[in-house]
Amino acid sequence: MGRVESLLFGTGGVPHSAKPGSTAAGIRRIAELGLDCMEIEFVRGVKMSEDGAREVARAASENGIKLSVHAPYYINLNAHDPATLEASMGRLLQACRIGALCGAGSVVVHSAFYLGDPPGEVYQRVKQSYGEAVRQLHREDNRITVRPEIMGKGSEFGTLEEVLDLCTEVDGLAPGIDFAHLHARSGGNNSYKEFSGILNKVRERLGRAGLENLHIHFSGIKYGAKGELSHLNLKESDLAYRELLQALRDTDAGGLVVCESPNLEEDAQLLKTTYDSLAKET
């Protein structure tokens, strides 16, 4: 996994202002907006052909835009029904295959639901499934990075510790860090000190290289007692985004920052301009 210089900012999905609304047009619009990256959303299923993926790769290369992919939501690596688990693995692998053809460096995954099972047992099942998936991808010479995402609801597998444990124990995994989810899941994790602590924990567990190749989801968020309810625009939420950006700057973090706010490109541009304006603390 090569070093990504500094932080690159972009959108989760095609910008609203892209015309037409295709992935390739979205990539060109990202470049026009002065942004740097885009996450391709396969969340309702991988419906892109191999030829379409190669067209996307050309558009990204021509415009200097880095890509990642979000795998379908319909994945549960803790599924009790063997057929459901097999289908989940198939969706994960297909997202990785088409993502690699697009030139994407990472695939972000919603790993599993606890389904009332003990978290330790769920962890072992999820770990086994990810290990099998990565081994299959390596047999195909597909080196795309698979990123289990930190999730925003207590019913969903994906605490910070679970994700970091997976990434230290399964080769080919790296974290998908959603700071809005971290905030929604706990009600905390919303100060410079807490953000810095999270980033330092990533460095402690995964080394300097882990901190230099982050994949971050960023948005405002509405939440309740059970965690995430919906995404919000940054200025309509209580997420301390300036403090988070300062922590990212002060730890010399690198990688992709993918904005998932409802207004997409507006908040992505806000994040980039705010980050650029912050002086490194001494």
Image: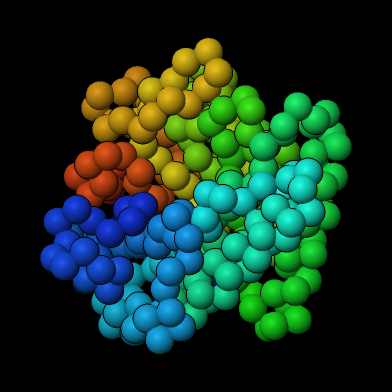
Q: Is residue 256 above or below residue 228?
A: below
By what rule are the colours in the image chosen? rainbow
Residue positioned 27% across, 39% down in the render: 262
Res 151 → quadrant: top right
* Whole-percent x, y for residue 75 in the image: 61, 51
* Whole-percent x, y for residue 121 in the image: 86, 37
Q: Is residue 48 left or right of residue 19?
A: right
Residue positioned 85% across, 45% down in the render: 124
Residue positioned 60% across, 63% down in the render: 91
Residue 114 seen anywhere in this rendered image of the structure:
yes
Q: How many marks?
A: 0
* Whole-percent x, y for residue 101 in the image: 49, 80
Residue 175 seen anywhere in this rendered image of the structure:
no
Q: Is residue 6 left or right of residue 26?
A: right
Q: Nearer the viewer, residue 192 or 83?
A: 83
* Whole-percent x, y for residue 94 in the image: 58, 70
Q: Is residue 52 left or right of residue 184?
A: left
Identify the image quadrant of the N terminus: bottom right
Q: Is residue 68 above or below residue 178?
A: below
Q: Nearer the viewer, residue 218 or 48?
A: 48
Res 180 → quadrant: top left
Identify the image quadrant of the C terminus: top left
Residue positioned 31% across, 39% down in the render: 261
Q: Nearer the viewer, residue 18 or 78?
A: 78
